[in-house]
Amino acid sequence: MCLKINRWWAFVWLCICATIAHSETYVPADNDQYLYTGRIDFSDVKAPSLSWPGTSIKANFTGEHLEVVLDDQNGKNFFNVIIDGNDRFPYVLEAKQGEHRYLISSALSKGKHSVEIYKRTEGEEGATLFKGLWLADDSYLLTPPKRPKRRVEIYGDSITSGMGNEGANNGADHLGSEKNNYLAYGAITARNLNAELHTISQSGIGVMVSWFPFIMPQFYNQLSAVGNNDSIWDFKQWTPHVVVINLMQNDSWLIDREKRLTPIPTDAQRIAHYQAFVQSIRAEYPKAQIICALGSMDATANEKWPNYVREAVKNMQDNGDNKIDTIFFEYTGYGQHPRVAQHNANAEKLTKFIKKKMKW
């Protein structure tokens, strides 16, 4: 009998020890020590919705354990989870549909750590609700990182999103797992400049025509990036110092090659449509430096489409806009979406341009 009792108490003690060893601290999404970046829907503060590429959550925390709680719409999104600034080797989180806890590490060193949860994918993969973090028992969030003072916003298509940038040079470039906005030229440029970045991009989108039934002039002012919807972003909420617009690659394909618009727009109409969109951005940001870009896919293989951009910018300059300019990323002859090496080259060019223009 004594032996049975002793075994029973031993079992109970093991259960107690296991419970103690695995006790955790939950930090919900509405904790004020999180630093959120990007167009994020806070309609539910306990479950903010991330849909745009590059939207992120940063936090500083203590302890050896970290889990992330996400509720993903479609099970198609990917995130970089970057611990202690080590972005060369992020934890790549493939979100499953629905709400799940994702163990990032249970063997961190004791003491202070940082985490960044960064959306690699875009609105076409759906939205993700961030529900919070699980930390080790008696662990907690520290004062968050400081928000950068410089602010950059970028409007673009698949190039800006980072479609296929981690794919093999001789491989496909449509896989969600190989779409990494963190290594797209805009995101790299923002880090080079120590600037906060908002990325407003959608693969396949154009100014006049897209691969789907909506265009950037119908999409740019949305709070949610999931398709064409009725959500509205409040532009007064966040004002950039620099706006980069890299559009017209899809227009060049769909108008000249695919003949998707009938009648085919004239040169003057192409310029007018592009100029109207840029002017809509200018109306939101009267003081921002606007940089109209194009490339580095085959829209810059010759001067036809860059000249449309130049002419629109010249029209605005002639009308008194002295805070608008152009930059073009050279077509390398590579026939697919640019890979990381090309994004790095484009980021280097854009970084130098902005530093000179803004005296940063």
Image (cartoon, rainbow, N blue to C red):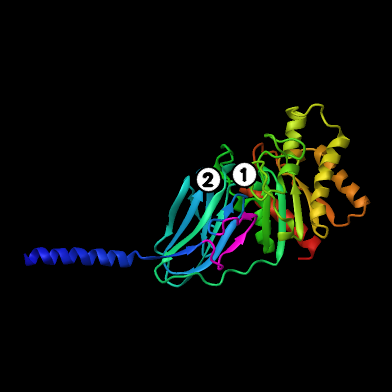
Residue at image location 34% in from the left, 64% down from the top: 22
- At which x and y percent is residue 200? 68, 49
Location of the N terminus by quadrant is bottom left
The residue labelled by disc 2 is: 73
- At which x and y percent is residue 117? 54, 57
Image side of residue 78 versus residue 247, left or right = left
The residue labelled by disc 1 is: 226
Verify whether residue 54 appears in magenta.
no
Element marked by disc 1: loop
**Amino acid at circle 2:** Gln
Residue at image location 76% in from the left, 55% down from the top: 243
Residue at image location 81% in from the left, 39% down from the top: 305
Magenta stretch?
Answer: 29-45
Residue 74: mark:
none
- Residue 41 seen in the figure: yes
- Residue 89 seen in the figure: no
- At which x and y percent is residue 216? 73, 43
Answer whether labels 2 and 1 touch (C-beta < 8 Å). Answer: yes
